[in-house]
Image (spheres, helix red, strand yellow):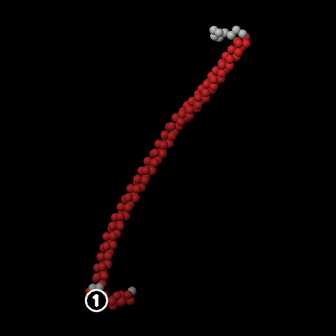
Amino acid sequence: MDSTTPTSAEEMSSSLASELEQVCHELQLAEGKVMQLELALLQSRDFAIGAAAEASEIPIIRAKFQNQFAKSERQLADANEHIKSHVAHIARLEQLVADLLKLEKVNKDLRTQMNHLKISVTWRVGRLIMLPIRIVKRIVK
């Protein structure tokens, strides 16, 4: 108590009652802080447990992504090989088309020559002379 101590019992009891109220109030504040600290401790413990669980999953996740990367690399290599094959096939087809166009020109030239030959006098005379022989050959067969 302080230097001015109450002298009467009533004053002393009211002083003690006020001190008791103050101590109770401080105790309640301290209990509230303890509860907050306990809650913070539980939250930090939960966070630590979660972080440890995530950290333990990292190698598994890493292996999964490595497998996916390897698979996509294989698919890319297969696709590139497929594309090369298609490009080579297209080049072969283009060469065949070019050859076909050349052959078509040769055929057209040959048809033109045959038409000129058939309208020539020599061809018509030879055909006229050979007509009886062809008829005899058909009869003999």
The reply to whether residue 102 is in sight is yes
The reply to whether residue 38 is in sight is no
Mark 1, secondary structure of its residue: helix
Query: Measuring 51% from the left and 40% from the top, which residue is drawn there?
Result: 61
> Counting other residues with Cα less than 10 Å from the Cα at mark 1, is it few (<14), some (14-19), or many (20 or more)?
few
Point out the image quarter for the C terminus: bottom left
Query: Measuring 59% from the left and 27% from the top, which residue is drawn there?
Result: 41
Q: Position of residue 96 (x, y in %)?
A: 35, 66
Q: Which residue matches tag 1?
A: 125
Q: Nearer the viewer, residue 58 or 108?
A: 58
Query: Measuring 37% from the left and 59% from the top, which residue is drawn there?
Result: 88
Q: Position of residue 24 (x, y in %)?
A: 67, 20
Q: Quadrant of residue 12?
A: top right
The vertical placement of 16 against 43, above or below, is above
Q: Nearer the viewer, residue 1 or 102?
A: 1
Q: Position of residue 73 (x, y in %)?
A: 44, 47
The vertical placement of 95 against 50, above or below, is below
Q: Hey, what amino acid is under mark 1?
A: Val
Q: Nearer the viewer, residue 122 or 71?
A: 71
The vertical placement of 97 against 124, above or below, is above
Point out the image quarter for the N terminus: top right
Q: Position of residue 16 (x, y in %)?
A: 69, 14
The extreme left residue here reads 122
Query: Measuring 68% from the left and 17% from the top, which residue is drawn there?
Result: 18
Give the total number of marks visible in the rendering. 1
